[in-house]
Image: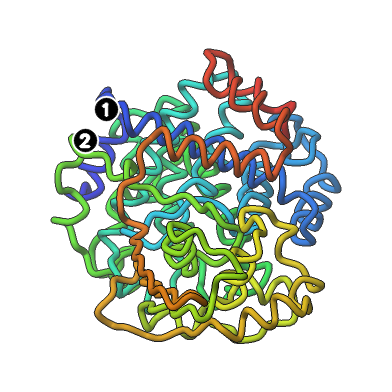
């Protein structure tokens, strides 16, 4: 009961196609970013709960948890997927409105460590998985997301399945069946946003991928056509079934090349404004007024006018731009604190910042107008979809990793990721 869509995805997922040089480079950078976010996220309450559960169950020592200690690979994928998304500081792909790395790398590194795969094998398997998760996200379309499904969890589960399946050596028929079985496991709701359930969604996708691939490898049989059809995943989960978008230039064009990394430790909706104002070299003493224009969708997401907590600050245009103008590093987690929200300098500056909705702007764009105290008017725009050169991206991600892990630890981790070692070589950094 093969389906054209699942069959083509499976053929791509098991192919010997060579990813583009840029896609491979971006995947390695995303591995660094995922690891930095995972290591830095271990102190979060949700991370402690998942680690405690994993350690209380014990089991075979197969893969390493963020924070140390080996547990079964499925549990490592669940916990690490959750932990690496706990800070919500990981990469995003806007084509399917999801975070590819947290689900896919968590599955790939868990199995890669268990099997003794090389770093190159793990990162390439993850790249295939992340590319496929983007393609599945395009197939599902905006209606799936708008209805309330979390693409990180749903499309991400299919990507995690592909990464795990490649590492296990599934053939094309097995991979198609694995995708079909994943259709009954992929799940995650936007209703969990703002709770521990959001990062848990990423963990669910990662562990589903490991479990499904292992079951199919062991001879488990499932309906390979469960993605499509009237009772399939797409139809039952309000997917648009956009085959053309999902399959266009598959294997020739790598959509993962356009992954977006977070360079600021706050809601991604704020990043375009921060990048635009960054180009103006904001400095608090010079600001008479600052006006931000943004897409209307962000007005109810990250436009808290006067938050009094560090968490609230991460969802406030006025606060993050004031932080930036005061010289605070918006890439650092400790820049968003309750104390800073009460700082008289920040409060005064925040009142000079105005936010306006503009539906002529793309969802990924923002426009900033600065009026200086000397009367000079400066303007800048930024779109997160705009290309960022590899060298500039690498430098900023290394700076981000250094802010999260410390300079020496992050530099050592990046050196390992660029080498020809095994997946196990990164576990000392966990």
Coloration mode: rainbow
Q: Position of residue 160 (x, y in %)?
A: 47, 44
Whole-number angstrom distance, CA of label 1 to CA of label 2? 9 Å
In the displayed structure, 351 sits above or below 16; it is: below
- The residue under the point 70% across, 28% down is 427
Question: What residue do we see at 82% from left, 46% from top?
Answer: 57
- Label 1: how many Cα within 10 Å (few below 14, some 14–19, many 20+): some
Can you see residue 364?
no
Left or right, 358 with respect to 243, comes to right
User: Residue 354 location in percent, x, y?
Assistant: 49, 85
Vertical arrangement, residue 200 with respect to residue 160, above or below = below
Residue identified by numbered label 2: 251
- Closest to the camera, between mark 1 and mark 2, is 2
Which residue is identified by label 1? 15
Toward the viewer: 42 or 17? Answer: 42
Decide: is 155 above or below 285. above
Front residue of 206/338: it is 338
Q: Residue at x 59, y 59 (%)?
A: 88
Give percent across and percent down for residue 299.
46, 84
Q: For this view, does 13 lie left or right of residue 341?
A: left
**Mark on residue 288?**
none
Mark 1 and mark 2 in contact? Answer it, CB < 8 Å. yes
* Lateral position of residue 38 relative to residue 183, left or right: right
Image quadrant for the C terminus? top right
For marks 1 and 2, the one nearer the N-term is 1
């Amino acid at each position: 009961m093969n389906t054209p869509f699942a069959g083509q995805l499976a053929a791509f997922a098991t192919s010997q196609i060579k990813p583009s040089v840029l896609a491979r480079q971006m995947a390695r950078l995303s591995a660094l970013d995922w690891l930095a976010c995972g290591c830095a996220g271990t102190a979060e309450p949700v991370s402690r709960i998942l680690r405690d559960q994993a350690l209380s169950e014990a089991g075979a020592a197969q893969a390493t948890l963020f924070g140390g200690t080996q547990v079964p690979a499925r549990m490592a994928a669940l916990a690490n997927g959750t932990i690496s998304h706990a800070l919500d500081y990981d990469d995003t792909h806007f084509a399917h409105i999801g975070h590819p790395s947290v689900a896919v790398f968590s599955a790939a590194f868990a199995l890669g460590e268990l099997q003794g795969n090389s770093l190159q094998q793990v990162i390439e398997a993850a790249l295939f998985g992340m590319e496929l998760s983007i393609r599945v996200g395009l197939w599902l379309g905006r209606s799936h997301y708008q209805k309330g499904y979390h693409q990180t969890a749903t499309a991400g589960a299919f990507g995690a399945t592909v990464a795990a399946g490649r590492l296990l050596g599934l053939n094309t028929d097995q991979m198609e069946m694995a995708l079909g079985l994943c259709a009954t496991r992929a799940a995650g709701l936007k209703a969990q946003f703002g709770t521990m359930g959001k990062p848990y969604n990423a963990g669910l996708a990662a562990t589903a991928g490991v479990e499904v691939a292992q079951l199919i490898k062991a001879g488990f049989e499932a309906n390979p056509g469960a993605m499509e059809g009237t009772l399939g995943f797409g139809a039952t989960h309000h997917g648009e079934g956009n085959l053309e978008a999902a399959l266009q230039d598959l294997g020739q064009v790598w959509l993962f090349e356009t992954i977006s990394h977070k360079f600021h430790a706050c809601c991604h909706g704020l990043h375009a404004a921060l990048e635009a104002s960054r180009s103006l070299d904001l400095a608090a003493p010079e600001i008479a007024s600052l006006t931000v224009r943004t897409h209307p969708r962000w007005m109810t997401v990250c436009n808290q006018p006067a938050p009094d907590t560090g968490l609230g600050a991460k969802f406030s245009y006025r606060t993050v731009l004031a932080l930036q103008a005061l010289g605070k590093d918006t890439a650092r987690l400790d820049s968003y604190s309750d104390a800073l929200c009460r700082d008289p300098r920040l409060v005064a500056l925040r009142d000079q910042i105005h936010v306006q909705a503009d539906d002529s702007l793309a969802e990924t764009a923002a426009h900033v107008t600065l009026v200086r105290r000397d009367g000079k008017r400066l303007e800048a725009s930024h779109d997160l979809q705009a290309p960022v050169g590899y060298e500039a991206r690498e430098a900023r991600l290394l700076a981000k990793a250094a802010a999260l892990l410390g300079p020496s630890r992050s530099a050592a981790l990046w050196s390992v990721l660029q080498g020809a070692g095994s997946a196990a070589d990164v576990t000392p950094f966990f």
